[in-house]
Amino acid sequence: MGSLLQILLALFISVIGALYLLGSFRRRRAGEPPLDKGPIPWFGHVLEFRKDTAKFLQRMKEKHGDIFTVQLGGFYFHFITDPLSFGSVVKEARTKLDFTKFAEQLVARVFGYNSMEIEHKVLQASSTKHLMGDGLVVMTQAMMSNLQNLMLHSVGSGDDKQWQETGLFTYSYNIVFRAGYLALFGNESVKSTGTLDKAKEIDRQHSDELFKEFRKYDQLFPNLAYGVLGPSEKMEAERLKRLFWSTLSVQKMRSRDNISGWVSDQQQVRDEQGMQEFMQDRFMFLLLWASQGNTGPAAFWLLLYLMKHPDAMNAVKKEVEEILRETGQEVKRGGPLIDLTRDMLLKTPILDSAVEETLRLTAAPVLTRAVLQDMTINMASGQEYKIRKGDRVAVFPYIAVQVDPEVYPDPYTFKYDRFLTPDGNKKTDFYKGGKKLKYYNMPWGAGTTMCPGRFFATNELKQFLFLMLSYFDFELKNPNEEIPGIDIRRWGFGSMQPTKDIQFRYRLRF
Ligand code: HEM
């Protein structure tokens, strides 16, 4: 009898436990009266959400429609999944929907950096000056010479004629990370090495070591951002953070050549604002993270999609060859290295479309805003939803629009010319419910937080591809190998990464 009671008691406790967990992950329509529970422990719901954010939000979208609320980590997140209604989030005044709070908390936890009052203004000013317009000409040049150093240093030596075999993801991420890092954070000083060749060699070694450490942090990142690292991972994250603070420290930066205006201006402003130097060092790591965590993975997907779609590869190759011909450049043995200016990169509609298509399929950020005062969200359907101060509003464009079959027929297939009009120009008209969409592809986010590095990033991808196509033969080791799946732990963090690497081989053509 006693044991029956014990069994019943155990059953009762487990049912109550299960109900509690389910309840703590309740969904409700936006505008419903507040739930009577206060903030609740976060692990149950975050685990559910984290397991596969895209799958979960897709299911919620199918069940609840254009807007629904999820209780996550003690906050009510109102997810908007109707792309025609994105404007009401993206364009809302900062006095109502604010992005800084959320971002500040994240960077404090993940990078140990305490933001300044004028953080965003400074970032925008320096990005507009150095990553766009005339500034981009300088950055494109810097990127090109660093890519040449990393990819072509052995041209003419006869060393690289043999096929090299490696993982495509590792290779693409490695090269794009290192060249981007050197372009932004500067080169080894020729004064200290004596010769340019020695300085370039040190750049190659140092950036390779840094990449290896960066990847370790990168792999810890999803759990770090969610605050769920195990004890040994925590120690490793701490070690890596300190290593980056020291490697990128303001003091070490002083002795480097060619530091970009983007990095040096931002450091100078912080100095003038009286920020302590150790905090400036932490900011440098934040800049490295924001600038180098996405472009490498995107370069991988771009190359892979092109390799798996020969029609796309041929079309892009033709465009690249045409541009080289027009500018009187030829890749030949013993000849000068090809130069690729920003102007040349403005004349590549086919490659632009292939890049945009790659990002549509593989860039999946969640955009989040904090609600600063009670307000109304106006949906395109005419419905209004009242949301309360303290809640969050979120948009996940990947599910909401980027893989919506109504907007993009056969949405999971790579079609290199999806963003081309029949006469070969950039296509911008995409429709949902018969209405033209303003927000049809959002790999860079939107509104005031839209990625300020997007033009530079696009150029990086194009430069990398140009050099691969012009100087190398390359192929998948197994051309029939399927495109690897997306690592679902990273939904919401920007460029997605594959679940596994895919082997390829490459060799210099000349
Ligand atoms: C394929 C490459 C890249 C992708 C997909 C990407 C995507 C994004 C996204 C989605 C955001 C957040 C937008 C939001 O919250 O609304 C962002 C922010 C940011 N990105 Fe990028 N990015 C890339 C490359 C770069 C590069 C190369 C740089 C710098 C050189 C850069 C610098 C930044 C910075 C500084 C922010 C923070 C902006 C802010 O707080 O206002 N990104 N990026």
Image (spheres, helix red, strand yellow):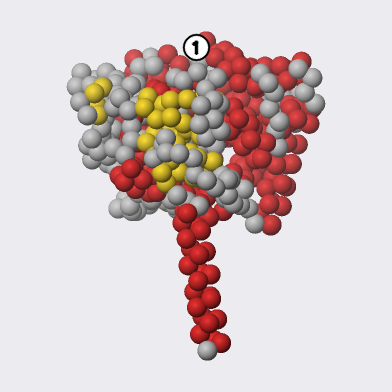
Give the residue displayed 50% in from the left and 71% down from the top.
Answer: 12
Q: Amino acid at mark 1?
A: Gly
* Quadrant hosting residue 255: top right
Q: Is residue 136 left or right of residue 28?
A: right
Q: Can residue 178 be seen in this snapshot?
A: yes
Where is residue 366 shown, x and y percent of the image? 47, 36
Q: Nearer the viewer, residue 67 or 323?
A: 67
* Quadrant hosting residue 211: top right
Q: Nearer the viewer, residue 294 or 324?
A: 294
Give the residue displayed 25% in from the left and 38% down from the top.
Answer: 405
Give the residue displayed 45% in from the left and 28% down from the top.
Answer: 445
Q: Which secondary structure lies at badge 1?
A: helix
Q: Nearer the viewer, residue 330 or 285?
A: 285
Direction bottom: furthest residue: 1
Where is residue 504 shown, x and y percent of the image? 41, 48
Where is residue 296 shown, x and y percent of the image? 50, 37
Quadrant location of the C terminus in the rendered image: top left
Q: Which residue is mark 1?
A: 133
From the viewer's perspective, is residue 122 above or below residue 471?
Answer: above
Give the residue displayed 61% in from the left and 21% down from the top.
Answer: 120
